[in-house]
Amino acid sequence: QLQASGGGLVQPGGSLRLSCAASGRAFSVNAVGWYRQVPGEQRELIAGITATGDTHYKGFVKGRFTMSRDDAQNTAYLQMNALKPEDTAIYSCNLGSYIGTSYYPGRYWGQGTLVTVSS
């Protein structure tokens, strides 16, 4: 089971840190992906971290978002800086796997957390 948290209302240029907490013992051997979804659009992968800690980012978040993981806490994080209004979305996490630089989502999804960037 996964649970995303940490969303909220933030002004443009502000920061938030999202958490993805997992239950169960499989967390450390899985990659984790962060997705976001704007109403009316498809969910899209924005960042991922392999089981060994390598990170991958979509171009529009690279340099602003940083993903990390703490396997002792069964938690992955998404530090979001320099937020823009277009970052407004529901953010959710997934346990999956990487083959090369391609992320393959697993069947476990967390409930999303809403991030609103607005002045």
Image (cartoon, helix red, strand yellow):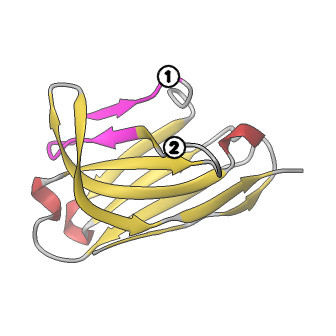
Q: Where does residue 73 sit, x and y in percent of width and height?
A: 26, 70
Residue 39 located left or right of residue 11:
left
At x 50%, y 27%, the residue is 62
Residue 47 located left or right of residue 30:
right
Q: Name the residue tied to disc 2.
A: 42
The alpha-carbon separation of the residues under discs 2 and 1 comes to 17 Å
Residue 119 located left or right of residue 107:
right
Q: Residue 59 got which mark?
A: 1
Q: How busy is the neighbourhood of tag 2: few (under 14 within 10 Å), some, or many (20 plus)?
A: few
- Magenta stretch containing residue 95, yes or no? no
Tally of marks: 2
State which mark lies toward you, 2 or 1. 2
Q: What residue range appears in magenta?
A: 47-59
At x 65%, y 52%, the residue is 39
Q: Amino acid at mark 2?
A: Gln
Q: Where does residue 18 sit, x and y in percent of width and height?
A: 51, 59
Query: Is the N terminus in the top left, top right, bottom left or bottom right quadrant?
Result: bottom left
Q: Secondary structure at mark 1?
A: loop
At x 10%, y 55%, the residue is 29
| View extreme (front): residue | 40
Visible residue check, residue 70: yes
Quadrant in which residue 104 is drawn: top left
Q: Is residue 66 above or below residue 10?
A: above
